[in-house]
Structure formats: C-alpha cells, structure tokens
Amino acid sequence: MPHTPEAPPRKSGSSPWLRRSDLFVRVIVRLYIGMLLVVLPWTHIWDDNHLLSYIPYLSTVALSGVVRGVASGLGLLNMWIAAAEAMNYREH
C-alpha cells in the first residue's frame, strides 16, 4: 500500500473583524488620497506653493496643465482601485 503524505495543518487566519477593518482603512485612505489628488492641482494651494519658488524651472513644469492632469488622473485611478477593492471583498 503506497504511503500518502498527510495534509499540513491549517493555520488559523486572522479574525474577520481584523480583515474588515484593514480593508476599511485601506479603502478610506485611498479614497482620501485620490480625492486630494483630483482636486488639489486645480486650487490656489498648488499655485502658491513656496517650495516651488526655489526652483523656477520646476515651478513652470508643476504649473502646466499636463502635470495637473496627470496628478488628477492618478487620483482617479487611486479612487478606482479603492472602489474595486471594496466591491471585490470576499469573506473566507
């Protein structure tokens, strides 16, 4: 009779509440960062950044519409990932 290997013992996973709270925190943080990246490039805060006054070339690049659009696009992508992660959550 051939010897069959035994199945490894199952590890006890983390509690469902810990997984849910982890998901909640990750989704909220991603949504917040995403909204910030969508709105911030089009406000006066982006224009009046004193750190950019030290490097004039960087200032003209940061104030261009392309860079603002890329930042807003990254914010939308971040919000999309957060929503997808929240909708695809499954309990084990």
Image (cartoon, rainbow, N blue to C red):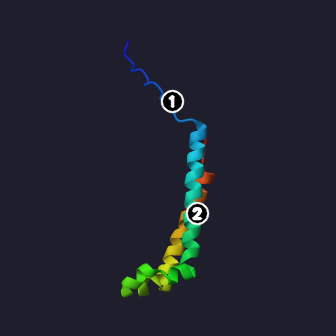
Q: Position of residue 53 (x, y in %)?
A: 41, 85
Which of the pair 40/90 is nearer the observer?
Answer: 40
Label 2 SS? helix
- Amino acid carrying label 2: it is Tyr
Q: Residues within 10 Å of mark 2 (few under 14, many from 20)?
A: some
Residue 76: tell me if it is visible.
no
Residue 54: tell me if it is visible.
yes
Image label count? 2
Which of the pair 52/20 is nearer the observer?
Answer: 52
> Which residue does the image show at 56% across and 58% down from the upper left?
29
Of all residues shown, which one is farthest toward the right? 87
Label 1 SS? loop
Q: Position of residue 62 (x, y in %)?
A: 44, 82
> Which residue does the image show at 58% across and 55% down from the upper left?
27
Q: Position of residue 40 (x, y in %)?
A: 55, 75
Between label 1 and label 2, give the one nearer the viewer.
Answer: 2
- Amino acid carrying label 1: it is Ser
* Quarter occupied by the N terminus: top left
Which of the pair 80/36 is nearer the observer?
Answer: 36
> Which residue does the image show at 38% across and 87% down from the upper left?
56
Is residue 71 shown left or right of residue 91? left
Give the number of the disc on residue 12. 1
Q: Position of residue 65 (x, y in %)?
A: 50, 85
Is residue 36 shown left or right of residue 4? right
- Mark closest to the chain's N terminus, 1 or 2: 1
Q: Marks 1/2: CA distance?
A: 33 Å
Q: Residues within 10 Å of mark 1 (few under 14, many from 20)?
A: few
Is residue 20 shown left or right of residue 54? right
Residue marked by disc 2: 32
> Which residue does the image show at 47% across and 85% down from the upper left?
63
* Quarter occupied by the C terminus: top right
